[in-house]
Structures are given as structure tokens and as C-alpha cells.
Amino acid sequence: MKHLREKAGYSQRTFSAEIGSPTYAFVSQIETGRGRVPPDQIRVWANVYGIEARKFLQMIMRFYDPETFAVLFDEEPEVRDGTAFPDLAEAGAAAEPVESDGEGAIEPETSADDAEPSSGRR
């Protein structure tokens, strides 16, 4: 997700504004696997990323729900193996989906390079 956001030219703050989120922390949580894009926001996020909503959903479903994804796309090897998503391949994520922790959260690749400074207020 971070790759898609950066490719579209957004910081977490500007992306948050585009999707109508009052805080960039929401985007950060999703990018680090501590949350999911709400189903009613799939089209909004895809539009801001500049990709088709169906393709975006396939991309994230591959990580969010690998078993359902496998059942749905077993007959479409390019979708199943991720090569249908050049944006993921560019980010080096096409090969293997991230494993679920069994409770709906995904185990992310964490990175501190996208953290934005805090205002110091809580």
C-alpha cells in the first residue's frame, strides 16, 4: 500500500485528506498491517491510487484473505501468483502474500522510513 501511495505522489497526510480520513494515523495503521481498508472505502482508495477498484480489491484480498483468494482465483495463475499486479511486482511483493495471524490482521513488513513527525500532543 505504501508503494501505491508513494507512486501516486502522496504523503500519508495528503493521502489521508484525499480519502477523507481525519488523521494520517489511519493510513499508517493500514500500511503497517494493523488494520484493513474498510470495504466501503475500497473504491475511494483505488480511485486515489489511480487503479481500478476490482484490481485493487484483488491485490489486497491476496493478503487479507489468502484462502478465499486461492479459491476464487485458482484458475487464473497470473492473479494467483501476483504477476497480474505490476505495481506489487515493482514493490517486490508479488511473489508471496503476507500470512494472516488467524484473527484478521496481517503480519506486515514494518518500516520506519514513512513515519511522520508527531505534533507532541496526545
Image (cartoon, helix red, strand yellow):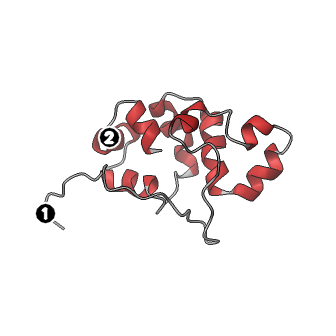
36 left or right of 80? Answer: left
Look at the numbered disc 1 and give the secondary structure of its residue. Answer: loop
Name the residue beneath numbered marker 2. Answer: 17
> Which comes before the other along the chain, label 2 or label 1?
2
Residue pictured at 54% horizontal, 33% vertical: 87
In the rendered image, residue 8, in percent from the top left (x then y), is placed at: 41, 30
Depicted 41 relative to depicted 99: above or below: above
Q: Amino acid at mark 2?
A: Ala
**Rendering quarter of residue 56:** top right
Seen from the viewer's position, the closer of residues 35 and 108 is: 108
Point out which mark residue 29 bears.
none
Measured in 3D between alpha carbons, the distance from the residue under mark 2 to the one under mark 1, in whole angstroms, is 21 Å
70 left or right of 43? Answer: right
At label 2, counting other C-alpha atoms closer than 10 Å, the crowd grade (few under 14, some 14-19, many 20 or more) is some
Depicted 21 relative to depicted 50: above or below: below
Q: Name the mark nearer the viewer: 2 or 1.
A: 1
Seen from the viewer's position, the closer of residues 40 and 30 is: 30
At label 1, counting other C-alpha atoms closer than 10 Å, the crowd grade (few under 14, some 14-19, many 20 or more) is few
Name the residue beneath numbered marker 1. Answer: 120
